[in-house]
Image (tube, rainbow, N blue to C red):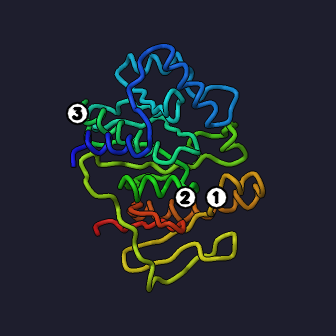
Amino acid sequence: MNAETVAQQAAVAAGVRVRLVEDVDGIARVAGFFAEVWRTPDEPLPAETLRSLVHAGGSVIAAYADDRLAGAAVAVFEPPRERAVYSLLAGASSSDRGVGFALKQAQRVWALREGALFMSWTFDPLVGRNARFNMAKLGAVGIEYLVDFYGPMNDGLNAGDESDRLTARWDLSAAAPALDHDRAGASFDLTAPDGKPLTAYRDDLLFCRVPPDIVELRGRDPETAFAWRNAVRGVFTGAFDRGYRVVGMSRDGWYTLRGAGS
């Protein structure tokens, strides 16, 4: 099934109309929408910045449920040698199931039309639902772990924590997503801050668990949330130094990392 058909079906399933946004008023709405999603009085990307990014060849794509803005995504190009685009910012209303997938598929169509082969973005590795979306639903792989990438962040989702990020890389021509990997027969190793297993190994696979809802945990118990940050950081930085990549994410919050050469 080609990218255009997948994008069209995703939009229909989500009940939205998805389009490129280039007009001033539409871009201003997107800027305000991002401020609502990130729970901050300031726009993460001001309207004038978004307007300039579009003028420079990037894209702002928005999803509308009737006239209500339900999600938006911004992409720019990486260096020409990479043949890739970088998804700079993306967000959807929490109540709109399927909107994020529709937006990503629309970004994919735009990127392929512009000659890109890959798309990259970063996300908080402790947010399991985002990891599941990126790795299992889209089929991206995690290629890089970035420690405290942004420095201190003061928005309503990230305040009080360090801004570690995982770089996802999506092969835009890939037809099948990354698969979940059964942990049956794996040997458990390290212990997580909640007293349950943190890691497990089997053959060339490393499994690492994250908390069910890190955003809720930050608000309720920031000390434990930071303990999770340090625990997962230690696993991922060591694994990436040994050539591992993230290739999957289970429904119950376990990453799968595969060793180099396998």
Task: Give the residue number, with chain letter if any, for mark 2.
Answer: 128
User: Which residue is nearer to you in this view: 138 or 231?
Assistant: 138
Pair 3/1: label in front: 1
Residue 101 location, x and y as percent? 42, 46
Residue 12: image x %, image y %?
38, 42
Q: Quadrant of the C terminus?
A: bottom left
**The disc label shown at residue 97, or none:** none
Residue under label 1: 213
Cα separation between marks 1 and 2:
7 Å
Of label 3 and label 1, which has the lower sequence position?
3
Residue pictured at 38% horizontal, 40% vertical: 11
Q: Amino acid at mark 2?
A: Gly
Measured Cα–Cα span from mark 3 to mark 1: 37 Å
Label 2 near label 1: C-beta < 8 Å?
yes
Q: Position of residue 92 (x, y in %)?
A: 53, 39
Which residue shows up at 69% across the image and 62% down it? 227
N-terminal of the pair, mark 3 or mark 2, is 3
Kind of residue at disc 1: Asp
> Which residue corresponds to mark 3?
115
Label 3 neighbourhood size at 10 Å, few (<14), some (14-19), many (20+)? few
Q: Quadrant of residue 38?
A: top right
* Placement of 152 over or under 204, stated as above or below: above
In front of the other: 54 or 166: 54
